[in-house]
Image (cartoon, rainbow, N blue to C red):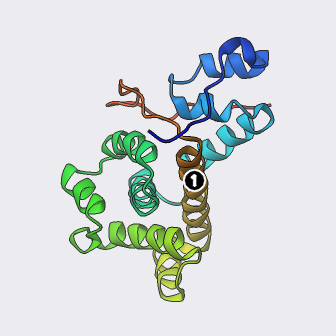
Amino acid sequence: MSPSLPLPADEDLPDDVRETLANLPPLNVFRAVATVPGAFRPFLRLGGSLLGGPEVDSRHKEIAILSVARETGASYEWAQHEQLARNAGVSDEEIEAIRAGDPASLDEDAALASRAATEISRDVRISDEAFDAVVGRWGEAGAAELILCIAYYNMVSRFLESAGVEVEDDQHLGEGFAPPPTPTE
């Protein structure tokens, strides 16, 4: 087992962070980010705004996030977003195609979302050809939303893997789960 940062106990957290955690699913990712109290609420707000953004549907965002997890080797991110992807309508066959790095078996839009995530995760920058295709499919606002979502989950995967955050034994994001509302100030 790789070394990991310890997850903070409730008594080690500021009251507002502890109260927010009490209203979230009991996931190690949230507790790990709570280690940095000043970043905790902004982290949740940005993630919530990206998952709930209006330009690209949640199904294609989840396909992109699974592609980030595959490309970065982020087992925690994969485990959580495999559940969320199913909730968003991604089929088991599509999940297996993403896991195998076989976007050719996905429909055109799903393959494009996967390609964008793979290129950004692997090369830092999306190719001109893929960028043009993303803009052509989702428009400029949708392209910005998808690229920011992919970039955010690259950050999340690198944090989780570097901090050694372990996957929970129980699934907390099963059928019908929707991300919590974005916290306000």
Is residue 181 visible in the rendered image? The answer is no
Q: Position of residue 112 (x, y in %)?
A: 39, 73
Q: Where is residue 65 in the image (x, y as percent from the top left)?
A: 45, 55
With 77 as the anchor, is 147 left or right in this view? right
Q: Which residue lies furthest to the top in this view?
A: 11
Badge count: 1
Which residue is rendered at x = 30% and y = 47% of the image? 89
For mark 1, give the secondary structure: helix
**Residue denoted by label 1:** 158
Is residue 180 placed above or below 135 in the rendered structure? Answer: above
Residue drawn at (55%, 73%), measured in percent from left and top? Answer: 139
Tell me the quadrant of the picture where the N terminus can be found. top left
- Residue 44 placed where, x, y %? 65, 38
Where in the figure is residue 82, as x and y percent of width and height?
Answer: 34, 45
Q: In this view, does 79 lie above or below 172?
A: below
> Compared to 133, does 146 lie above or below?
above
Query: Could you tell me which residue is drawn at 66 percent across and 35 percent down?
Result: 33
Q: Quadrant of residue 96?
A: bottom left
